[in-house]
Amino acid sequence: MVHLYDLIDQEGKTVDVGVTKNLAQRLNQHTRRVTDGTSRRGKWYGHDLNIVSIQTFESRSDAMKAEG
């Protein structure tokens, strides 16, 4: 299973839309600011993030198609 997730900050701005096999680990990476991309774009912390949506797919390719 692969998860497509959408995160926003408290101002309603999209922080990340991504695909992962391990959602808990990926969200933990965001909250600890250890990701290479989004956490370095601005100052945000895990408690400031909101999960807008989570979709589950059978394959990474299906999730990537849905991501757009």
Image: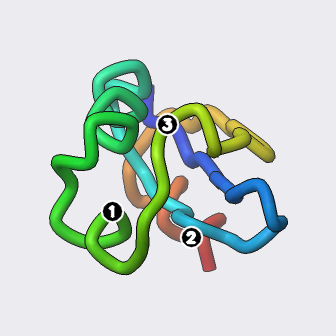
Q: CA distance from mark 2 to mark 3?
A: 27 Å
Question: Which residue is at 40% across, 19% downward?
Answer: 24
Q: Which mark is residue 39?
A: 1
Measured as percent of width and height from the top left, residue 8 is found at 70, 58
Question: Which residue is at 42% across, 33% downward?
Answer: 27
**Comparing marks 2 and 3, which lies closer to the viewer?**
3
Q: Which numbered disc, 2 or 3, marks the residue that appears first in the sequence? A: 3
Q: Return the residue at label 2.
A: 65
Question: Which residue is at 57% across, 37% downward?
Answer: 57
Q: Return the residue at label 3.
A: 46
Q: Secondary structure at mark 1?
A: helix
Image quarter of the N terminus: top left
Measured as percent of width and height from the top left, residue 46 is found at 49, 36
Left or right: residue 20 versus residue 68 is left
Question: Which residue is at 71% across, 39% downward?
Answer: 51
Q: Residues within 10 Å of mark 1 (few under 14, many from 20)?
A: some
